[in-house]
Each structure stands twice: as C-alpha cells, then as structure tokens.
Image (tube, rainbow, N blue to C red):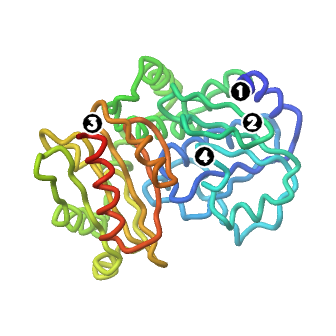
Amino acid sequence: MNSLAEIARQLEKDNNYLLVGHVIPDGDCVGSLLGLYQGLCAMGKKAGILLQDPVPALYGYLPHAHIIQSPGQLAVFNGVAVFLDCSDEERVGEQSLKVLTHSRSSINIDHHQSNNLFADFNYVDAQAAAAAEIIYHLLLELKVEITPGIANALYAGIIMDTGSFLNGNTTTASMCISADLIAKGANVNQARINLFESKTWGEIRLMQLALQNMEISEDGKIAWITLPLADLIAIDAADFFPEGIINYTRMIKGVEVGLLFRETENEEVKIGFRSKMNVNVAAIAEQFNGGGHKQAAGARQQGNIAEVSSRVIQSVKDVIG
C-alpha cells in the first residue's frame, strides 16, 4: 500500500483524471467524488466523474453534482482512473469498468477494511469513518484550498457515513475535520434540509412499506425489512435507493443486528447489514460475497428474496448464538 503523500505525488504528475464511485452511490461516495473533483480542477487538472447509477436527488444541492456522467455518456477513457469508496474494482459496475478498460493507470482511495488493493496505487485507511475524511487529508497534502464547495461535499460525505455522528465509526478525527469544514464554509442548515428534511412523497411511501414489512426474531436480537420487487413496483418505488431505512431496524430495543433485503430485477437481492454494537457484520457479509465495515456492510445474491433472506438470517443467528 502507498502512503497518502505518494498518492498526492501521483495526482500531481498527470493531467487527465476520471473519478469513479460505486453502484448505488451513497453520500460518502458522491461527496468524496465531488470534493476531489473540485480539488483537481483547482490544480488545473482535467477531471471528470463517472457513476453507473444516477446520483440520488438529495445530493443535487452539492456544487457540480450535475457534471457527473453515466457510462453511456462517455467514450473509452485512456487517462488515470481514480476509484473512490470502492472495496474492489467490480463495485463500480460492469458498464463503468468497460469505460475504464484502457486507463493508463489506476488509483484506489478507500476506507473499507475488505479492500483488496486492486489498483496500481492504493491508499486504504480502515480507521477513517468516511472516504471524505481521506479526501480532506489528501487535499491538504496537495496544498489545495478547502473552498465552501469542497467543504459542503466532504461534510455531506462524513454526515451520511457516520449517521450524523451517531454511528460507532465516528471518531475525534471525524468531529475535528467536520468542525474545520464548517469553518471553511460547509452550510449545516443546507445539509440538514437537503439530506434529512426534503423527502419526496414517494420516499415516504417507501418508508411506510418498509415499516409494514419489518419483522423481528423470536429472541428479539435480529430485525429485518423485506422489500419485494412487486411491492416496490406497486408504489412506483422500484428505482428508489433512499439511505437510512435500514436504521429503523436498529432502533428497536434489544436488536443487535438489522437487515434489509431489497429485490431488484433478474432475481437479485441487495442485502444491507447493520450492527448495533459488537457483531461484525462485515464478516457475515463476506460469506455472501459482500463486505464493508464492522457495523455496516452490504452484499448481493441471486435468488428468490424469501430464500435469500432465510439463508442470511440463519447465518446471523449462527453468529449471535
């Protein structure tokens, strides 16, 4: 693995970058991409951003969110590919990988403990609560001024990956970095309103469905939400990817692990894992070709949602005992 200083020196060398994030992008993914994009532009570099899936509407308030492109909008790229918030190369999606086929070199910046150091240059800090924290330190290393635009992007990333500083991954560094971002122009009210107080009626209906479909184990240690594709289609929410619904499972007293099963087309089930305290859900997710952090992880499986959920719940029971 490389040092952060070595990653900075690599970014100084070239002039053509394409920043790429993972499928179903969350706040940390989007915020990190936009923060580094603005930093590279300030250095006079040519940069673009690639995401296979659309940017969720709640991040539309962030500066330059509109410049993010999909694979269909780009030709094959032959510059330097920078992977952000991706534990492995496949996380960017098959279509994005095709765009990157002829990249001259690659840089991997991440905070997932399961990262397999897949790029030519790699920097992974599993102690960082969010990739946005790493980008903050990287921009300082590059001597790039943290503008209000950069501050808002990175602040959004930290807010979302720490669960508004309530998750166990929150550190003193998270708080100190966020304080500095606010001092440099991150708008707290703007973040609160856009990230938490601007839900559409469709998202509220999805939340209603999720709560109706929540179940709990007999011992009260596991709670899970199932979202079958037919139910999502019925409320016109098949394309919604709102963050935070899974956290309702952890709000129940006594629950140690919360799960979310969301069925998509082609009989694929996306699985979210959340741990309240000591259970390492990243290790459980790895059993299903997934990964993540000790208290927050994800995976995907082919199959019927009832069968997949049954297998995963049993695996959690085996761990909890």
Q: Which residue is mark 3?
A: 276
Q: CA distance from mark 1 to mark 3?
A: 37 Å
**Disc number at residue 42?**
2
The local secondary structure at tag 1 comes to loop
Compared to residue 183, the image places residue 308 above or below, namely below
Label 1 Cα crowd, 10 Å radius (few <14 / some 14-19 / many 20+)? some
Please tell me which residue is depicted at 25% across the width and 60% down the height of the picture.
Answer: 225
- Residue 157 on image: x %, y %: 49, 40
Question: 10 Å neighbourhood of mark 3: few (<14), some, or many (≥20)?
Answer: many
Label 4 vs label 3: CA separation? 24 Å
Kind of residue at disc 4: Cys
Dots 4, 2 in contact, CB < 8 A: no
Q: Which residue is tagged 1?
A: 144
Q: Is residue 191 left or right of residue 114?
A: left
4 vs 29: above or below: above
Sequence-wise first label, 1 or 3:
1
Amino acid on which the number 2 mark rests in the picture: Ala
Query: Which residue lies at the image location 21% right of the left edge and 52% below the top edge?
Result: 223
Looking at marks 4 and 1 on the same chain, the residue that comes earlier in the sequence is marked by 4
Dot 3 falls on a residue whose secondary structure is loop
Q: Earlier in the sequence, mark 4 or mark 3?
A: 4
